[in-house]
Image (cartoon, rainbow, N blue to C red):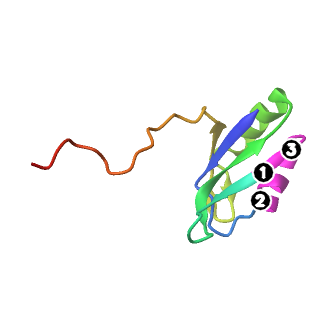
Amino acid sequence: MRIYVGNLSYQTQNADLDQAFAAFGDVESATVVMDRDTNRSKGFGFVEMPDQAQAMSAIAGLNEKDLDGRTLTVNEARPREERPRGGSGGGGSRW
């Protein structure tokens, strides 16, 4: 099960996420999403747990709890929405 973790401190690392979720069961991966340009945390991440019961327990146990001085938002990750790719922003002719 894929879990969204929001409101992360900019100092939180992948290992910190892994450690917090490991208290509830097996963690396949724990990733803090980083900005491509600045290489700084975007303040959210994702955790993959293979066992749904353990994942639900982690969500219940960590949502609105403190990690590195921030109150976490933890819930089941939603599928990524398809966003249109585009260049100019469109808008017809300029005549």
Which residue does the image show at 52% across and 34% down from the upper left? 81
Precedes in sequence: disc 3 or disc 2: 2
Q: What's the CA distance linking mark 2 and mark 1?
A: 6 Å
**x, y (%) of residue 6?**
60, 50
Q: Amino acid at mark 2?
A: Asn
| Residue at mark 3 | 27
Specify whether residue 17 is painted magenta. yes
Q: What's the CA distance linking mark 3 and mark 2?
A: 11 Å
Give the residue at the far right of this rendering. Answer: 26
**x, y (%) of residue 39?**
63, 70
Which residue does the image show at 77% across and 39% down from the upper left? 58
Q: Which residues are magenta?
A: 14-30
Decide: is 39 above or below 50: below
| Label 1: which secondary element | strand
Q: Amino acid at mark 3?
A: Val
Which dot marks residue 30? 1
1 or 53, which is in the foreground? 1
Which residue does the image show at 74% across and 64% down from the upper left? 13
From the viewer's perspective, is 33 left or right of 53?
A: left
Quadrant of res 71? bottom right
Q: Amino acid at mark 1?
A: Ala
Decide: is 91 above or below 71: above
From the viewer's perspective, is 47 left or right of 33?
A: right
Quadrant housing the N terminus:
top right
Classify 10 Å Cα crowding around label 3: few (below 14), some (14-19), many (20 and above).
many
**x, y (%) of residue 91?**
22, 43
**x, y (%) of residue 44?**
61, 54
Labelled pair 1, 3 in contact (Cβ < 8 Å): yes
| Label 3: which secondary element | loop
From the viewer's perspective, is 66 left or right of 88?
A: right
| Residue at mark 2 | 14
Labelled pair 2, 1 in contact (Cβ < 8 Å): yes
